[in-house]
């Protein structure tokens, strides 16, 4: 009997310490909630009563007019917010610390919105892995939602969907018919934001979009144009030369804020160092960097701190276990002289993502004990599935062996979630192909030239309604790619 209680006590202690090692962003504790309960949290018809700034102040009449008095609808088949529509939505509830969540995600406080609870429920509405909106539940009859520039205050009108409002919303939101991205849609819309780093550590983003496999004009912008749950952000790098020497900076800034040369010095979310960092990958919430012979993954929201995350932050302790086992396997493959000189335990924050054969892979780095070797470090593959916190979409659909057989010079490949277009990277070029019956078209739709040393660090896809929603933002920031690049 004593033995049984002893084992129970040890198990409880182990669980306590194990869970204590797992860091969760925004103090979020995920609820395990049946889908129907998540729907019920929003189910019904709501009206937009207030338009608030990010500081919680009411916006002026001209800015608020496009929102006030419009409806929001939620059920299993549709989510509507004003003129935005999500077909066949999926709902997920998270219970979060109210102040931590608003401060980390929107750089504001719960107090400014009159949220007195320490914990609040946030319902994320998605379709086909594309985020529609995050809805903050104030209470049973009141919601908050951030549209990027503003917070909207919603009040419940009815627990049921108003059929007239639903029909009017569908008719007035667009002149064309709206279909679910999960249906077999005769109107295929795919788009990708491709982030590219040059050999000189400058960055640009290329926009490639198709409609029914017909290519639209390819566009580009300087720096990295990053889609996030809170709107589009710009991530980039620049150098400054002063009488004290040269400094290198990387920054991340919401596109609702200015990022001109004159304003860069005023940006808060910027990391300035004497050593130059290179961005190795970028996702919705994290960027991978390489500097001074080290890897580091940094939260986009806190670039200025310059502190990398622990691998367990995004993959719990299983992440470090995989990292350790992978490093041991790699060390055993080295010759005896090298294996004696190399550090045996990898740093928990010394990792990043890199591209290989159409997929992202996680890489770790091991340092030598001294610089007797030609290289001061060795890189190794970490055998682990890429956590969704880093990259949300990484499907190829067409086998890499098939791509190489068809295009021997292929170095990398990206395929749309719609399976209708593919971007194939070759030496010095990106080829855009259409796909039919799982096969690449005989000839590419377009060839885009790359400079020597260019590498792809980001690929963010949008399909269906989201492709068109992104395109509206792209049209404001991007310019057509010159003929010399095509």
Image: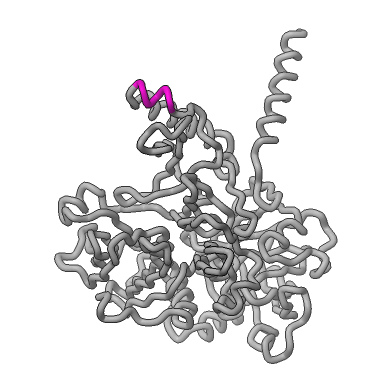
- Give whichever of 451, 421 is nearer the camera: 451
Counting labels gives: 0
Check the image and name the residue furthest to the bottom: 62
The answer to which image quadrant residue 428 occupies is bottom left
Query: Residue 337: within the magenta?
Result: yes
Q: Main secondary structure of the magenta part?
A: helix
Query: Residue 186: within the magenta?
Result: no
- Tell me if residue 121 comes above or below residue 62 in the rendering: above
**Would residue 469 be found to the left or right of residue 479 on screen?**
right
Res. 161 in view: no
The residue depicted at 44 percent of the width and 28 percent of the height is: 342
The residue depicted at 40 percent of the width and 32 percent of the height is: 372
Q: Residue 164, position in %: x, y?
A: 60, 81
Res. 282 in view: yes
- Give whichever of 454, 24 is nearer the camera: 454
**Would residue 217 be found to the left or right of residue 230 on screen?**
left
The residue depicted at 25 percent of the width and 75 percent of the height is: 486
**Would residue 197 be found to the left or right of residue 390 on screen?**
left
**Would residue 310 be found to the left or right of residue 215 on screen?**
right
Q: In this picture, which residue range is highlighted in magenta?
A: 336-341
Q: How is the image coloured?
A: one colour
Q: Residue 6, position in %: x, y?
A: 74, 13
Quarter of the figure that contains the N terminus: top right
- Give whichever of 9, 281 is nearer the camera: 281
The residue depicted at 73 percent of the width and 84 percent of the height is: 59
The answer to which image quadrant residue 464 occupies is bottom left
Q: Residue 444, position in %: x, y?
A: 20, 68
- Give whichever of 126, 28 is nearer the camera: 28
Check the image and name the residue furthest to the front: 243
């Amino acid at each position: 009997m004593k033995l049984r209680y002893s084992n129970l006590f040890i198990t409880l202690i182990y669980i306590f310490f194990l869970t204590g090692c797992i860091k969760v962003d925004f103090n979020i504790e995920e609820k395990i909630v049946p889908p129907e309960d998540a729907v019920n949290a929003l189910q019904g018809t709501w009206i937009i009563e207030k338009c608030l700034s990010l500081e919680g102040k009411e916006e002026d009449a001209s800015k608020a007019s496009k929102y006030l008095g419009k409806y929001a609808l939620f059920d299993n088949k549709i989510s509507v917010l004003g003129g935005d529509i999500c077909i066949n939505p999926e709902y997920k509830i998270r219970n979060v610390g109210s102040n931590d969540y608003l401060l980390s995600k929107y750089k504001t406080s719960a107090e400014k919105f009159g949220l007195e609870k320490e914990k609040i429920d946030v319902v994320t509405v998605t379709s086909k892995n594309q985020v529609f909106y995050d809805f903050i539940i104030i209470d049973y009859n009141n919601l908050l939602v951030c549209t990027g520039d503003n917070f909207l205050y919603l009040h419940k009108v009815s627990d049921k969907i108003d059929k007239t409002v639903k029909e009017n919303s569908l008719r007035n939101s667009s002149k064309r018919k709206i279909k679910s991205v999960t249906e077999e849609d005769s109107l295929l819309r795919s788009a990708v934001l491709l982030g590219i780093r040059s050999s000189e550590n400058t960055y640009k983003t290329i926009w490639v979009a198709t409609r029914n496999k017909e290519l639209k004009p390819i566009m580009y912008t300087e720096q990295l144009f990053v889609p996030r749950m809170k709107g589009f952000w710009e991530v980039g790098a620049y150098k400054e030369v002063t009488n004290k020497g040269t400094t290198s900076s990387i920054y991340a800034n919401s596109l609702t804020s200015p990022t001109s040369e004159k304003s860069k010095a005023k940006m808060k979310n910027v990391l300035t160092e004497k050593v130059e960092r290179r961005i190795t990958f970028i996702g919705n919430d994290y960027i991978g960097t390489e500097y001074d012979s080290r890897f580091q993954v940094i939260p986009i929201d806190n670039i200025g701190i310059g502190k990398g995350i622990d691998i367990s932050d995004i993959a719990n302790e299983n992440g470090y276990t995989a990292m350790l086992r992978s490093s041991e396997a790699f060390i055993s493959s080295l010759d005896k002289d090298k294996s004696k000189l190399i550090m045996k335990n990898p740093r928990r924050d010394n990792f990043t993502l890199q591209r290989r054969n159409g997929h992202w892979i996680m890489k770790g780095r091991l340092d030598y004990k001294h610089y007797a070797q030609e290289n001061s470090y060795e890189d190794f593959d970490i055998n682990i599935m890429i956590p969704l916190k880093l990259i949300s979409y990484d499907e190829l659909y067409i086998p890499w062996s098939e791509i190489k057989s068809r295009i021997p010079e292929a170095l990398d490949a990206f395929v749309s979630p719609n399976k209708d277009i593919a971007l194939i990277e070759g030496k010095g070029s990106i080829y855009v192909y259409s796909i039919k019956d799982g096969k690449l078209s005989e000839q590419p739709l377009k060839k885009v030239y790359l400079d020597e040393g260019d590498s792809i660090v980001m690929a963010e896809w949008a399909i269906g309604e989201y492709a068109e929603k992104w395109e509206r933002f792209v049209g404001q920031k991007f310019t057509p790619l010159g003929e010399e690049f095509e």
